[in-house]
Image (spheres, rainbow, N blue to C red):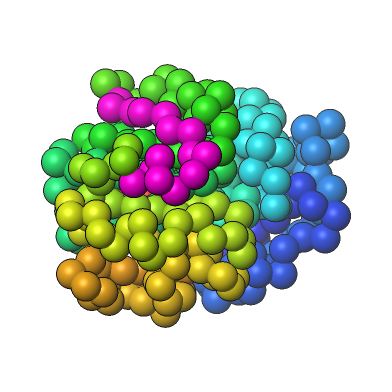
Amino acid sequence: MKKILIQLDTDAHPSSFDRVVAVDSDVDEIMSYGDVTPVNVEPLVHGAMFTRGPKELHHTAIFVGGSDVCSGETLSKKIKGTFFGPVRVSVMMDSNGSNTTAAAAVLAAGKHLDFSETTALILGGTGPVGQRAAQLLAKRGATVIVASRSEERAQVTCEAVSAMVDDAKLKSLSLKDHKQMEEANKETNLIIAAGAAGVKLIPAACWKPMKQLKVVIDLNAVPPAGIEDVDVMDKATDRDGILCYGAIGVGGTKMKIHKAALRQLFETNDLLLDTEEIYQIGANMNS
């Protein structure tokens, strides 16, 4: 029986990136729908639920994508609420690549750091990737500093992560100038830049002198670099004693996680793959 992936995208045009990755993940057929909302999604979900028998439902799966992560989260919640009993299919949520990217970044950092002894600074920490990286790091015992231009938004993110992670060690930081960052993060061991594409978040003169800093990860693939002097191709590149990762250096792992998660969707009909589940897939790949 053919493996069918139903791509539900919140954008007008379903992502070609996600379609290509699905093809490379051995999906037989992809049904792509754009402008999907909680209002119009139910018939599409019913089409996945009621067309195959109970023992065949694992051959159908749903992928939630699109550029707006908040919309993807809302859509995923509606999809899950449509299922009942064993009549369901597996679902993966990765709007804007947020879950796979955060998982890849944290896994890269974990190669070099003991998170229980790590203080991590996340630049752009209130964005979709930053929030998920904060969640994953906090769950593994790191002290996480969520940085944003807005103190209020940083605090809201800390509260949201605390609601998901017991005993999370979180701090909010409002970044109004680079000097403030330097003073506030003398104990920082890890920096992850997860801000908007093409925006320099921290100059080299600010991060290179940090004596406790061991790893920096810039997830921005569009010039200029989010972390100045980190090259997009860096992959554990030693720069003055600090190990550096660029977006493409992390991207290989992200792609492997994405493909492995898609393949896993077709092993059973009751998987719900979100941040933690997708991270675990990546961790199992590297074990």
Q: Is residue 171 magenta?
A: yes
Q: Can the viewer see residue 224 in this picture?
A: yes
Q: Nearer the viewer, residue 78 or 133?
A: 133
* Residue 91 higher or lower than 211, as above or below: above
User: Horizontally, is 132 left or right of 106 in the view?
Assistant: right
- Work out whether residue 285 can be spotted: no
Place residue 122 in its image quadrant.
top left
- The residue nearer to you, when weighing 14 against 158, is 158
- Is 30 magenta? The answer is no
Q: Place residue 134 in its image quadrant.
A: top left
Residue 207 falls left or right of residue 118:
right
Q: Position of residue 111 (x, y in %)?
A: 20, 61
Q: Which residues are magenta?
A: 168-182
Residue occupying the point 45% across, 21% down? 159
- Residue 239 in percent (x, y) is at 26, 74
Please tell me which residue is depicted at 30% across the width and 21% down the height of the picture: 166
Quadrant of the frame with the C terminus: bottom left
Q: Position of residue 224 (x, y in %)?
A: 56, 70
